[in-house]
Amino acid sequence: MPARAAKSWPQRLFGRWWRRQSPARQDRYATLGPLVSVLLFLAAIISAFWYLRNEELEREQASVKRDTEIAQQQIRLRLIENQEQLVRIAREIGTRVIDQEEFLGQAASFTRERPEITALVWIGPNRARKASYSATTFLAETGAVPESADNPRPPEPEAAYDAARELRQPVYSRPFTDRHGTAVFQVHVPLIDRAAFAGSLVAEYSVESLVRYFVPAEVSNRHAIALLDASDRTLASTVTSMPGANSRRAQIVHDVPVAPAGNGLFLRGQGYRTSIGLISNTLFWMVAALSVLTVWMLLGTWRHMRRRLQMQSALVTETNFRRAMENSMLTGMRAMDMDGRITYVNPAFCAMTGFLESELIGRRPPFPYWPPDRFEENNRLLQQELQGRSPAGGIEVKVMRKDGSLFDSRMYVSPLIDPRGQQTGWMTSMTNITEAKRIRDQLSASHERFTTVLEGLDAAVSVLSVQQAELLFANRSYRLWFGADARGHALLAGSEPSPFENSEFGDTIESLGGLPTTELTEAGSDSREVFIEPLRKWFDVRTRYLQWTDGRLAQMLIATDISARRNAESLAANQAEKAQVTSRLVTMGEMASSVAHELNQPLTAITNYCNGMVSRVRNDQIGKDDLIAALEKTARQAQRAGQIIHRIRAFVKRSEPQRQPAQARDIVEDAVELAGIELRRRNVAISTYVAQRLPTLMVDPILIEQVVLNLVKNAAEAIDNAGLPPKRRNIELRVVPRHTPEEGGVIEFTVTDMGPGLKEEVIARMYEAFFSTKTDGLGIGLSLCRSIIESHRGRIKAQNLYNGDSVVGCRFSFTLPVDITRSDAESTSKTATPNPTAVS
């Protein structure tokens, strides 16, 4: 008995739930139940097929990964073994244990046992080939052979050679194709002779031989193994594709890097699925077809039942909709018959008047919501309504609530027509407009206040009709400056007022007369500074288009008097110019002792030459040729002194800043010539590096020369004040092109020294005016340099140079924008030539 009760408990629970459902819901559940069962069955079949297919794919992926890592391990062990032998040979060469003949013998023995190595080359420190051995008939590419049109030189060997020289450890080059079309890569082992770089030992690997000899046969029989470069280009593979045929993309791929090369070379294992896909399975399609047929039949039954339910509920839905619409309306609705008797009112009408529906239905005039003092007026309006002469815009009346309060309303009247087309009465809609009238009055007052504000503005505000060139509005400031004439608007806009009604532009504007002006406003808004000659004033003019109250397109101008600001900017520019001249004078003042020393040499020589000639002339001990030679030497020394004075005068003279075409090389040469006096006094050397074919700069050359001179002089002072040894008393000045996404094409000037560097707090404040780390400094040098560079739309920055955690120097750099493309920058950098200039 208990077992039977336990078995019937779910049935009783389900039966109770089923009986609580409506017949329509029971029909829906009865239709959807089989549909859900079929869909679950189809989902289970698809999941089973999908699981089996994924399991087979995972096994194949694991096999490809295992074979690829086996091949990687074989190649890795071989490369490490070869590298150890090459390091041993390089050590013997560096310590001069073997000479060139012994090297050739060891190279022959080494390559004979290692078929993957095609050549061994001994390169000296100047990249000259001292000895080489090739296992083939071709020589290895080392970068030592001059490049020509018929013999292009790949860049990879040179890059690997430079890296080995810098790192002092074996370096693998990137794979490349030699001149004979063979894919190879090299390992450069540096030769060290008494801690100095003495060249490198180069071993060239054949990529195809690595795959042929070191990929196990059992691995290549199962899967395709290929060696690829960093650009995903296949260099060698265990499977050769048919000529002219595109190889099919492998479905399973596993990539591993080729260590210890680390040069962009990686190993790729490829595999393919052997089983058919889910879509190609016949059993799957049979199950899917039967499931679709069952689903289609169930859907047809469900649609038939749904249409029947829709027809049954259509009448109820329409009735509920009508009732809900009437009850939710905020507009009061009142229906009258042809005799003026009220036949219908909605809840909104009752809520507005405060009367119940029973108190209004069947009532005749006068109605209870008529104010007692307006009976005659309301009766006249009612008779007008019954006669069908009510205005289309409605009538405004006073309505009294049941509590005696009044409110303003607007009534609209329309006839009631029965299905036979005969009029049976009138329908009146009533809207409470008390709040609307209040808002309208507030808007009118707000408009008056807004007009008062516009009249009190110091800026001139004017609105001009675009079509008729008619001045639609002008505030007090506009009338004070320009009167009531539209020509003042035209002066501010920069054009004469003219109507556009008959022009092509006028037709376009007219067609947009009824559309919003948001897009025209965004497109036409601008800000300009205009000088009005009759008033001798500068104005900041802002323009935008708007739609006037009558729909016409109009142009509004807001003109602000900025004459005082322009005068202040002009005064600030003059002060900045004076500051720049002062800075140059201060620089020359600081260099006065050096300049005096520099001028003393030619003047002393002139004095000695003159005294010698006077003494020899008095003693009749000088001939004509000797006298001419002495005078020529005296003239050359005088010219030298004059050139020094001319250069200083050209640098410190006051002139208006002028942008003109200038060459970076000329600016650098002039600045270095001026700085040479100070550098020689401080025993500091400078080397310059200026790229060739640099574009022309549109700058003020004197100002840029002032920046370069200031940076070079600061670097020399930092080196001299730190008391650095001679090997660190040098400055490097570089000028190269750059192309960055932020600035575009620029010319970069860099001043690098080997001094003590700058503190972090100094870097943060060094561009502040009157901030200086020198005891006798004014603190305006770097501030002026930054102002000069930013006025040329450039940037200036400073950074310390580090060797580990130690500061080994400082670098100042600034950029000047030019019209230069990325390709031009790269080609110019490659052809740049150094111009070392030592000053001590």
Image (spheres, helix red, strand yellow):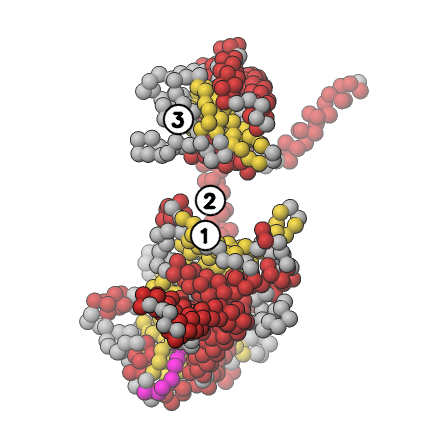
- Residues shaded magenta: 534-541
User: Which label's residue is closer to the chain start, 2 or 3?
Assistant: 3
- Looking at the picture, how far across and down is residue 475, in whole percent? 40, 84
- Residue under the point 80% across and 20% down: 2
Question: Is the N terminus in the top left, top right, bottom left or bottom right quadrant?
Answer: top right
Camera-near label (2 vs 3) is 3
Which one is in front, 45 or 401? 45
Magenta stretch, main secondary structure, is strand
Q: Mark 1–mark 2 contact, CB under 8 Å?
A: no
Query: How far apart are the two marked residues, 1 and 2, measured between alpha carbons?
Result: 97 Å
Distance from label 1 to label 3 (Cα)? 36 Å
Q: Amino acid at mark 3?
A: Asp
Q: Residue at the far right: name it.
A: 2
Name the secondary structure under disc 2: helix
Q: Is residue 190 above or below residue 638?
A: above
Q: Which amino acid, by three-letter code, is at mark 2?
A: Ala
Q: How many numbered marks are there?
A: 3
Residue closest to the eye, 554 or 58: 58
Rendered residue at 36%/34% (across/down): 147
| Residue 836, numbered label | 1
Q: Is residue 701 visible?
A: yes
Residue 178, picture quadrant: top left
Magenta stretch encompasses residue 539: yes
Where residue 541 appears, as percent x and y from the top left, is: 38, 76
**In the foreground, 440 or 782:** 782
Are there few (<14), some (14-19), or many (20+) residues within 10 Å of tag 1? some
Residue under label 3: 178
Residue at the (40%, 45%) spot, across then down: 830
Give coordinates of residue 87: x percent, y percent: 58, 25
Q: Which residue is mark 2?
A: 314
Counting residues from the start of the chain, the first of labels 1 and 2 encountered is 2
